[in-house]
Image (spheres, rainbow, N blue to C red):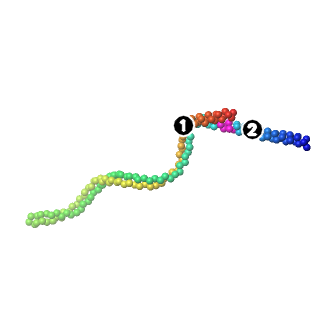
Amino acid sequence: MRRVAGPLLVSLSLLISLAALAVGGIAYYRATVLQRGILEAVTQTRAALASLPGRTVEVPIHIQETLPISAQIPVQEEFAVPIHTVLPVSTNVEVPLNIPVLGERRISIPIQADVPIHIEVVIPISKTVSLETSVAVNLQVPVRIDLDTLGIEGLLEEVDARLAEIERQLR
């Protein structure tokens, strides 16, 4: 039995060793492919970071709100109203008249006249008007950010230096 068991164990060990070698080769191949993918991603990221200075980013911001408005508006005005008219006068006036020998008598005098009136009347208005309303706002505002104004040059240089180290290690 020892004669059969020895070669069988050797064959089985050889088969297990070959399987482990195949699994290790596949793992090494996949790790190499993964390493090349990471290296390409790091290279592209460094190129994108190098193009950031001097760029402007535009981000649209959507605003949809209802804004309440409450205000007290003082109004102080003066209005000049011109009046141009003719006032007709038609009346009888009794005037006492002292006549010697006859005594005092009352005489009725008819008056017929047109009195022209030319006047400008100033009317002051002083009032506070209350305003209570809501305004619906629905708009899209483009916000432009100049990346040079953010002061992130040092941060970009630090990130690029770390990515360069990773790239060097992956090569």
54 relative to 104, above or below: above
The amino acid beneath tag 1 is Gly
Q: What element carries label 1?
A: loop
**46 relative to 84 in the view: left or right:** right
Q: Is residue 39 found inside the magenta-colored segment of the image?
A: yes
Label 2 sits on residue: 28
Tag 1: Cα neighbours inside 10 Å, few (<14), some, or many (≥20)? few
Q: Position of residue 52 (x, y in %)?
A: 58, 36
Tag 2–tag 1 contact (CB < 8 Å): no
Q: Residue drawn 68% across and 36% down?
A: 39
Towards the viewer: 77 or 30: 30
Relative to 83, 26 lies left or right: right
The image position of residue 18, as x and y in percent, is: 82, 39
Q: Give the range drawn in magenta.
A: 37-44
Q: Is residue 75 above or below residue 33?
A: below
Identified by mark 2, the residue type is: Tyr
Residue holding disc 1: 151
